[in-house]
């Protein structure tokens, strides 16, 4: 996350190629480590001021959202979803993004809805 901030600097220090690479690497790391069930409960204190991590009340769903710093006046975000499947294994999913689209939402809360079917 520090390199994302570094490469997003003002007009003189901005490096869009390096910034895109750093965001891609962060996304890949979250996807790789998200398959570890223990990460659903991990605190990530070092990321508290750099990305928003929200977890469902039952602890079976977590969303990692961060500002890619690649937008101009419009903020662009990426998100990774981590969830515990029926098998008990941790799974990771990320929404398909369109290069240059920047329409990905930022998630900051998870609401639980009870369903009669489970």
Image: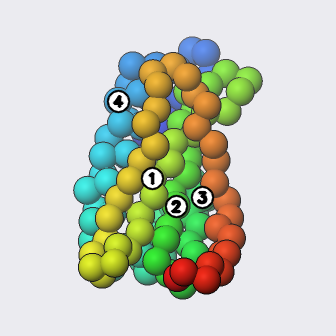
Check contact, mark 3 vs mark 1: CB within 8 A.
no
Alpha carbon separation for disc pair 3 and 4: 20 Å
Q: Is residue 57 left or right of residue 98?
A: right
Label 2 Cα crowd, 10 Å radius (few <14 / some 14-19 / many 20+): many
Callout in the foreground (2, 3): 2
Alpha carbon separation for disc pair 3 and 1: 11 Å
Label 4 element class: helix
Residue at the spot of label 1 = 80
Callout in the foreground (1, 4): 1
Instruction: Locate residue 87: give its quadrant.
Output: bottom left
Q: Earlier in the sequence, mark 2 or mark 1?
A: 2
Label 3 element class: strand
Residue at the spot of label 4 = 21
Q: Residue at x 63, y 54 (%)?
A: 107
Q: Earlier in the sequence, mark 2 or mark 3?
A: 3
Residue at the spot of label 2 = 63
Q: Earlier in the sequence, mark 4 or mark 2?
A: 4
Q: List x then y, in percent, for residue 2.
A: 46, 45
Q: List x then y, in percent, for residue 33.
A: 28, 62
Q: Earlier in the sequence, mark 3 or mark 1?
A: 3
Alpha carbon separation for disc pair 2 and 1: 6 Å
């Amino acid at each position: 996350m520090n390199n994302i901030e570094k490469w997003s600097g003002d007009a003189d220090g901005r490096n869009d190629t390096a910034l895109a690479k750093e965001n891609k690497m962060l996304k890949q790391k979250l996807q790789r480590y998200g398959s570890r069930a223990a990460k659903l409960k991990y605190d990530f204190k070092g990321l508290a001021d750099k990305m928003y991590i929200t977890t469902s009340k039952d602890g079976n769903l977590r969303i990692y959202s961060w500002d890619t710093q690649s937008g101009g006046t419009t903020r662009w975000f990426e998100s990774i979803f981590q969830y515990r499947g029926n098998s008990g294994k941790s799974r990771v999913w990320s929404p398909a993004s369109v290069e240059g689209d920047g329409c990905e939402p930022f998630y900051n809360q998870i609401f639980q809805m009870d369903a009669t079917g489970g």
